[in-house]
Image (cartoon, grey):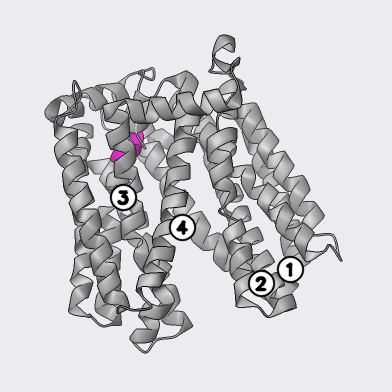
Amino acid sequence: MPPRATFRDVFGVREFRALWSSVILSTVGDRLALVALTLLVYDRTKSPLLAAVVYATGYIPWVIGGLFLAELADRYPRRSVMVFCDGARAVLVAVMAVPHVPLTVLVALLFAVTAFAPPFESAKASVTPAILHGERYVLGTAVLQTTLLAGEVLGAVAGGVAVAFIGVRPSLAIDAVTFIVSGLFIGLGTAARPAAARPESVASSPLARMRDGFRLVFGDKALRTLVLFGWLVVFYTIPAGIAAPYAHRLGGGPIATGLIIASTALGTMIAMPPFTRFVGPRERINLMGPLAILTCGTLVLTVLRPGLAASLVIFSLSAAFGVYQNAANTAFVVRAPNERRAQAFGIASMGVIVGQGVAFVAAGAAAEVLPPPVVIAVGGGIGAIAAFVLTLRWRHVSPAGGRHAAGRSGRAAAGSSVPTRRSG
């Protein structure tokens, strides 16, 4: 059995410290820009619809980026891709900070800024196994995921505070600086590595490469099952999508709404580090299915119409069971071919973003005719059934199902090089 890694082991790696620091800055910067621009649009137009459209603009580019841009992190050196993405975002956000820029231009710039996120995230996810090996990689991935959640919360709060005290334009200028510093961390703190993809593998057209990427992810039974485990997030984040009507039904206002949204991520943020630190690789893989069932199934309890306090406990507990995503993500990474890993990650991430958007819209429409607690309970029940089916399928994946899957993934994560396949 490989030795258990510690947080000191992970942060003892200089390259990981640089990567981790850049993630904090990039994530906070992303959220800060999105919140600041949304507030600016609402302040100018007083239109909730236009403000919502602007907020959605911060997510739509993930579809395009996941399909066509994420593969850049396979075709070019991953450090160069991350530095370029941070540099481009810094320039675009700096232009957004210029006074008197029309709203339509601001929205277009936000779209462009967000479009650089998929290749950056794909490069980050793909280079991490080269920086950390064995159980250090698993624990390091958990640290990055936890940091991402914390960064999104901090960035949203920082955006609101910054706009309130110094205004939108200075807030955007600060955002541009965060991207510059993030790029410096990556460029100066990580090693140069050659592009992962072979020249002959990128000679085809973008559409052909996209087709091959889907064939890679969904043509392999293990990868397909793992990415579907990852996509279950669309069910257990439904409470965040209808937080406002749920809180209103309980007699709460903006504070209650914020608490509900926070509870859907807080449990994962708290549970992720100890789960990866103290649960072994075989156990993580074996627990992936049961935890996925629980993270969705727990939401069925909302059918009992709990009060706000009990609801927050239910949502936080559901989010805590969501730590299974770490097992799915790391298994996906070690199974995907290194030369196609970034593209596969981009496709998986794109599915999450699209799925959440569809789920939020569907839940909102359902909440027009059904009580929000019932909508959440139904969504959780559907997710639990899907998780149960995936658990059965995972146990029969050959040659990596059940105990064999645990052993293989454990050995892969413990090895000094990345095997040929991965999870999302």
Choose mark 1 or mark 4, whichever is in front.
Answer: 4
| Place of residue 262 in the rendered image (x, y in percent of width and height, measured from the top left) | 41, 67
Disc nearer the start of the sequence (3/2): 2
Residue under pointer 4 = 357
Q: Is residue 243 above or below residue 190?
A: below
**Is disc 1 surrounded by few (<14), some (14 to 19) or many (20+) residues within 10 Å?**
many
| Residue drawn at point x = 19 percent, y = 20 percent | 399
Choose mark 4 or mark 2, whichever is in front.
Answer: 4
Assign the N terminus to one quadrant of the image: top left
* Distance between mark 2 and mark 1 Cα atoms: 8 Å
> From which residue to which does the magenta span run?
326-330
Disc nearer the start of the sequence (4/2): 2
Q: Is residue 273 above or below residue 261?
A: above
* Distance between mark 4 and mark 3 Cα atoms: 13 Å
Q: Tell whether label 2 touches label 4 (CB within 8 Å).
A: no
Q: Tell whether label 1 touches label 2 (CB within 8 Å).
A: yes
Q: Is residue 18 visible?
A: no
Q: Is residue 307 above or below residue 335?
A: below
Amino acid type at circle 4 is: Gly
Is the magenta region chiefly helix, strand or loop?
Answer: helix
Residue under pointer 2 = 39
Assign the C terminus to one quadrant of the image: top left
Q: Is 197 displayed left or right of 164 in the figure?
A: left
* Distance between mark 3 and mark 2 Cα atoms: 31 Å
* Distance between mark 4 and mark 2 Cα atoms: 21 Å
**Is disc 2 surrounded by few (<14), some (14 to 19) or many (20+) residues within 10 Å?**
many
Residue under pointer 3 = 232
Residue under pointer 1 = 168
Q: Is residue 90 above or below residue 382?
A: above
